[in-house]
Image (tube, rainbow, N blue to C red):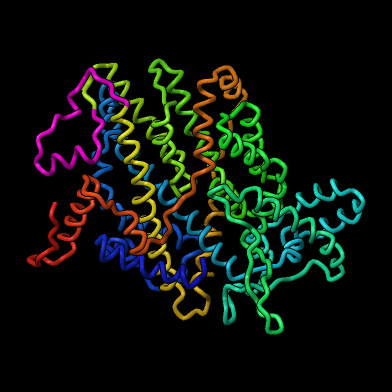
Amino acid sequence: MKVEEFVNRIDEAEKVLKYTFRLNFAAAEDQKQGMPAEEVANQERGLLVEEAAEQAYRMFAPFVSDRWNGHPFLTNRVRLDELNKNLDIGILTEFHEKRKNMLIKDAIVSVYCMVREVVGEENRITVYASGEYAFFDEEAFVEEKEAEQDKKKKRKNLSKYITGMDDLLERGIYHKFGEGKNPLKVEKDHVEANRAEFLRSRNQPLKRSINGLDKKLAEVSGYKPFIKNKEVNVKGESVLREFLNISDLDVMAIFRRSSSRWNVVEKIEKSKSDNIGLDIERLQELNGLYKSLNQLESLRHMTAADKLYVQVQIEKVLNYNMMVCLWKNISELANSRANILLFDTESIETMSNCFKMNNVVCRAEIVNMEFDGLRDYKELQEKKENRTMDTWKTELQDVFGKTIARQNDEQDLFDLNRWKAVYKEDIDSWTNWAFPLFLSCFCVVLRKNIEENMKGKGQNVVCRMYNELSEYIKEKDVKLETRLFDENDMRELEQNTIMLKALSGYVTRAIETAQEIKVPITLEEIDTMMPKKKDYYLKYSKLQFLKRNEAVLAGGMSVIKFTI
């Protein structure tokens, strides 16, 4: 998105959080009270990010605390703890800290990626120039000259010198960042002027391979073409010119490095259109593609922030890491004593909702927690102990004085559909409520803190945002944990056609699904997020608004009335 849109979205998100959701901005400031002004203004790089994340969570926590405090997974875990006589008083803290840390980690990564894309939009580059800056290393040119007659070797040599945008900023190759009339615009150094002949030789192969990728992946929902067109005026005539964004040159080079492996995506899509299921060979190819794309350790011209950005883009296209995590949980349940099968069409549709979650770094852990909740529920059932699997609907029926049959006291019946209902509700909550709202809180608070920190300074706020976030990621070495199918998984699938057929459905859903909610949120996103029909989820939203409304408005003032 363009910088103007990004800034405007933060402005509107602040109003939405303050006046629609009634989040308490004063609570976010509590920890900063009493801090000397000089200390606020001179915080080390990276500390601003940590502070903003903590402030945002203090502001956001009341929005979800009621549900999380009474969550059935927590209730059941405490009961099991008591039965096993562990009496671990830290279990409640651990439950909430885990969710808090996941929100914070994913928000930091997501905002970094957004700001980086904003910088990319302000710095467009030709395909010709991308041949230099995507592989910015003297040795790349030297080795290319030595291997001039060997095209295969030339390609291999280039792939070793893939260069990230953050690395180029760090080395000062991209400079003047944060200065001048357009602080987001960078100036570029060159390797050497006499490299023009090599750049010309790279131009057409690069263009062909990038166009090939764009064409090959055109039908994949999460894929965004690298080559874009813009209209320019040449001697009074309107002409379309091709360009790339500097934010994605490293992603393009990584995708291009595995160009032939991407054919498996086309094969899977064709198999689906021909109504043919996934075979083991295609799965091995897909596993190989994901492994190849994530081989980033040896690339010396990519910082931790560059590598993380690339991994996030890979996951947004394939959803592969999420799919492997989901399947390993499903497979474990199918092979366990519980023998719980999630192979039918309805289960595939419900379970695949996790691919819509935009918090790609930690979303696999959310799914792991969902399945841990199912295991705890099953264990309590086997012990003939009270357990719960309440959805918000059940809780709200209590709130509104309805007469219902409680699920807590049922000892004999195990109903998988109850867990599915909680799973569906939780995934929807993370996708459409918890993560978008927290990320918006973080954006607003980080921007405010940077503006306060930069008083009297001329540096652009978005530039400072980028520097703070990239520095934090590098300092903390933030990573996306990657998952692959191993030999045992492949062997089991090869021997079990029923499981392979079910997995085929999950793989197809993973490739077809893209994350949709735009952030920071505006009133347009609120309209999308808010359920339109008169259901219990909508009632819950209204009820929570009323609670916050009463808390925020001064005593004695009338509050907004809803018909529940």
- Answer left or right for 380 relative to 439: left
- In this rendering, the answer to whether 37 lies above or below 394 is below
Quadrant in the rendering for residue 393 = top left
The residue that appears at 67% across and 66% down in the rendered structure is 243
Is there any visible trace of residue 478 in the rendered image?
no
Judge left or right: residue 554 versus residue 328.
left
In depth, the one of 448 and 399 nearer the eye is: 399
- Above/below status of 419 relative to 434: above
Residue lying furthest front in this view?
274
Q: Position of residue 511 (x, y in %)?
A: 54, 42
The residue lying at 59 percent from left, 78 percent from top is 179
- For this rendering, which residue is in front, 236 or 439? 236
Asked if residue 339 is among those painted magenta in the image, a careful observer would answer no
The spot of residue 106 in percent (x, y) is 46, 50
Look at the image and say whether residue 406 sits in the magenta stretch.
yes
Magenta segment boundaries in residue numbering: 388-416
Residue 364 appearing in the image: yes
Q: Residue at x 18, y 61 (%)?
A: 549
Q: Is residue 538 above or below residue 18?
A: above
